[in-house]
Amino acid sequence: MVRRQGPVNEHDGPVRTCVGCRARTSYSELLRVVAVAGALAPDPRRRLPGRGAWLHPDPSCLRTAEKRRAFPRALKVTGELDAEGVRAHLEQFGSTAAGSPRGRQQVKEAGRPVMSQP
């Protein structure tokens, strides 16, 4: 299980709790997840409507949240939710920040030098 260290008051901005490891941290370090048609959908831009749950972009936090059945509780929905969309998102973006545009660019261009545009 992933445990994040440090007091909450060190973070700037809003603080959220990861539904997997239950650690409180800045929302900028977490991935927002929403329920869409019976499935979990990642919301890296934090713009999708509805109630959201927060998760570290770490597969172990996702596994822990699924094991604890935390998503239906946090999102206030009944029944099981398919987490394949979130799992694919975590695999695609790896350990980058919670879907930040800079992180996406680095993953896309991994292994190649980053060239500036004229």
Image (cartoon, helix red, strand yellow):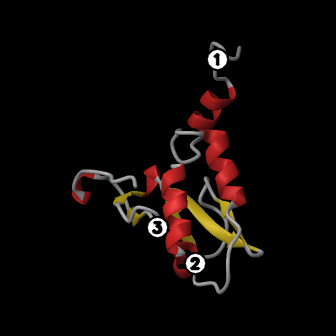
Cα distance in 3D space between marks 2 and 3? 10 Å
Locate the N terminus and report the quarter of the image it occupies. bottom left
Q: Is residue 6 above or below residue 64?
A: above
Say which element carries label 3: loop
Q: Which residue is mark 3?
A: 19
Q: Nearer the viewer, mark 2 or mark 3?
A: 3
Q: Is residue 62 above or below residue 106?
A: below
Say which element carries label 2: helix
Furthest residue in direction bottom, as rendered? 78
Please, what is the three-letter code of the amino acid marked with disc 1?
Gly
Q: Which residue is mark 2?
A: 75
Task: Please report the residue visible at 58 percent of the width from the left and 39 percent of the height from the top.
Answer: 94
Q: Is residue 31 above or below residue 33?
A: above
Q: Residues within 10 Å of mark 1 (few under 14, many from 20)?
A: few
Furthest residue in direction front, as rendered? 67
Please, what is the three-letter code of the amino acid marked with disc 3?
Val
Horizontally, residue 107 falls left or right of residue 60, namely right
Q: Position of residue 102 (x, y in %)?
A: 57, 34
